[in-house]
Amino acid sequence: MFYGIIKVRFCDNYYFSCMLMPTGRQQADKTKELTIMPQLWGGRFTKETDQLVYDFNASISFDRKFFGQDIEGSIAHVVMLAKQGILTKEEKDAILKGLTGIRQDVEEGKLAITEEYEDIHSFVEAKLIERIGEAGKKLHTGRSRNDQVALDMRLYTRLEVLHVDELVKELLCTLLRIMEENTDTYMPGFTHLQKAQPVTLAHHVGAYFEMFKRDRLRLKDIYHRMNYCPLGAGALAGTTYPLDRNYTASLLGFEGPTLNSMDSVSDRDYVIEFLSALSTIMMHLSRFCEEIIIWNSDEYRFVEIDDAYSTGSSIMPQKKNPDIAELVRGKTGRVYGALISILTTMKGIPLAYNKDMQEDKELTFDAIDTVKGCLALFEGMVRTMKFRKEIMERSAMQGFTNATDAADYLVGRGVPFRDAHGVIGRLVLYCIDRKCSIEDLTLEELKEISPVFEADVYDAVSLQTCVEKRLTVGAPGKGAMQKVIEAQKEYLTRDWQDEEGIYMTKDSGSGK
Ligand code: ARG
């Protein structure tokens, strides 16, 4: 089958020999005799692809990741082609046997996805033809790699939306447990990182619960919007074969087919939306990590990160560093980077498919893997973290976190709020001078500043009253908090992934 030996320029002055076929590639391996794989589109070409061009253009090193989805899409396509009489039953059976055999062999490690193919689509088609002969050449009838890759990416992303959602849900379960156990754990609430008013640990963690709950809503929303099948759009203008696009869509668990073939092959909105949701998840994780790093410091000592989730220093024997929290915070930039990169890639692309869009994959895959890793590690770190309740409570009693309540006490006795604010401001100054808290002052001292104070002020400004009287919806008081916890518990029993039509390919093999 070889047509000869030629020399191919590899780098500026470096040449290596390779075997020549009319329109193939040359593998840049300086040590071995080189195998050349014919390209799917070779017919129109009279010259070899330049090696550097080949390498620059090829995507198999990363699109192998959706090998399972490529097979799954091909199976649906072939079943539809046979139903429409475009393939015979015998051809369909042969192709399906070939495709499932390839999938099994790759999964069992008997068949390697090697890089002498341009992309995963070429690999599957070449292997199919190698195994079943003529019928294999009919697989691509009524299909283009443009709608094929649009489908593969959508199938892959759709599944990953569910995987990420699952991890966020696991984190929510852990957060809810911490909330349930800490409705009485008082701690300072901060604004400007200055102590502001007392809250509880349950309430503080509850804020993150809300954030991650919204993240799940975003994922659900994206899932439904992206759940339309682009296969059958062809290269850009549909096809003259009588395809049943509704049928293909239903075989693959989609709501239906996409409705404009040009948009179908050039839409990557769902990737951008997913990366945006992932970026928001990372932003939330990063904020929480930032707090944990502060809380874990010797100055705060609100928490102690478990040894299993900490690291040491090569020089300072005493160190126990919050590296995991720092890494999660650090990796946030990487996920934002993927979002900005793809937004920028897409902004100047004329309709319809352009090769720029191949750039959607590596960064998206990396972002998904990064977020999944961060979610799993963060959940473990929080689950095993020790909360130092006494230190939190002591801290909540310092820093005049009850000053607003002291002003509210005066308001309750007829002093206009603005005047009460001024009185308590002077009271705080007086306490700072004497290095004490409001409740440390005698009633005589208090009355000197305002005669309105009575003995019941001590109870009104106690830490417990300050928290427990805050009972409006969403406030930290135990009564309010318990109602929220009940609602969140009920929310976690419902699962949008159980909704009818939500499709999870359990056996989607991967070409990792
Ligand atoms: N590897 C390509 C991609 O990721 C597949 C589509 C190729 N289509 C084409 N017209 N060259 O976008």
Image (spheres, rainbow, N blue to C red):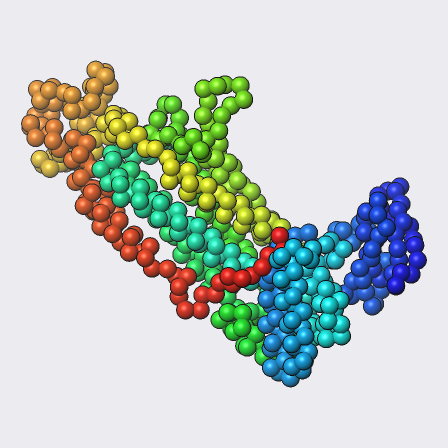
Q: Does residue 425 appear left or right of residue 447 in this picture?
A: right
Residue 351 showing in the rendered view: no
| Nearer the observer, 105 or 368 | 105
Q: Residue at x 38, y 23 (%)?
A: 298
Residue 447 pos. (x, y %): 9, 23
Q: Residue at x 39, y 66 (%)?
A: 499
Residue 214 pos. (x, y %): 39, 52
Q: Does residue 391 appear left or right of residue 411 in this picture?
A: right
Which residue appears farthest toward the bottom when viewing the image?
85
Q: Is residue 257 above or below residue 480?
A: below
| Nearer the observer, 74 or 155 | 74
Residue 88 pos. (x, y %): 67, 82
| Nearer the observer, 58 or 122 | 122
| Nearer the observer, 389 or 200 | 389
Which residue appears farthest toward the top when viewing the image?
434
The quadrant of the picture occupied by the N terminus is bottom right
- Say how many tags the image has: 0
Q: Quadrant of residue 394?
A: top left
Q: Residue at x 60, y 49 (%)?
A: 363
Q: Does residue 485 appear left or right of residue 118 in this picture?
A: left
Q: Is residue 35 above or below residue 200?
A: below
Q: Is residue 337 above or below residue 398?
A: below
